[in-house]
Amino acid sequence: MKASCRSRVLVVGIGLAVGLSSVARSENALLNPGFEQPDGRGGAVPDDWMVYSAKRADIGIAPTAGRDGTQCIKISCAGIPRHFQGIIQVVNVEEDGRYTLSAWVMNDRSNPLQGSAYGQLAIEWKDDEGREVARTWGEALKPTMSRMRWELAQINRAQAPKGAVAAVIGIHLHEGDRGGKGSFLVDEVSFVKE
């Protein structure tokens, strides 16, 4: 009986080791995924990321609000109807490859999203001439998201379409028809090939 139990433990242990090694092979394609650079400059745009906006961007580093107590980014509403803004990074992809985009998100405790505002993850697939081939959207990060704990937002196993050679990884804020209020936080963004 003891030998059988040891065998099962060994098999489970080997299975876990194999599972961990396959996870380790999936490397995050994003640079500065935890928004740790530049260090300590509240409100600064994180290194390796670009900000875009329809009219006015309010995106920057929050120095001590991160999931692990360090930096994250804060994306705040401008209060403008139909306004949108976000932070993006471009990475190379392989046609027909499957990718998972994830980020830890939380409503701002002192100034949470309100009204018609919502956040969203997106992958914009580009061809070799920079034209958009397709776009994959994540679920809306609504004002009901937690203000007390970080939640994982994901786009799971999205397949790069034919002709795609790059992906624009985006974290967006849409303010809706009435213009939104509040902010949300984002940390530890990951984009990995499955």
Image (cartoon, rainbow, N blue to C red):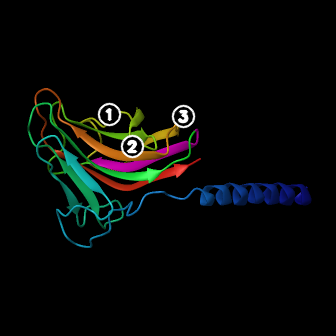
* Quadrant in the rendering for residue 50: bottom left
- Are circles 1 and 2 on residues that touch, CB within 8 Å? no
Q: Residue visible at 24% across and 66% down?
A: 64
Residue type, numbered disc 2: Gly
In the rendered image, the quadrant that contains the N terminus is: bottom right
In this view, 188 is above or below 135: below
Residue type, numbered disc 1: Ala
Mark 2 sits on what residue?
130
Farthest residue, direction bottom = 39
Farthest residue, direction front = 129
Residue placed most toward the observer, 8 or 60: 60
Mark 1 sits on what residue?
140
SS of the residue at dot 1? Answer: loop
Residue placed most toward the observer, 67 or 80: 80
Mark 3 sits on what residue?
162
- Frontmost of labels 3 and 2 is 2
Q: Reading the chain from its start, which is encountered first: label 3 or label 2? A: 2
Residue type, numbered disc 3: Lys
Q: Residues within 10 Å of mark 1 (few under 14, many from 20)?
A: some
Circle count: 3
Q: Residue visible at 43% across and 45% down?
A: 167
Residue 9 percent across, percent down from the top left: 79, 58
Numbered range of the magenta stretch: 96-106
Q: Is residue 97 magenta?
A: yes
Residue 112 percent across, percent down from the top left: 18, 44
* Quadrant in the rendering for residue 84: top left
In this view, 190 is above or below 125: below
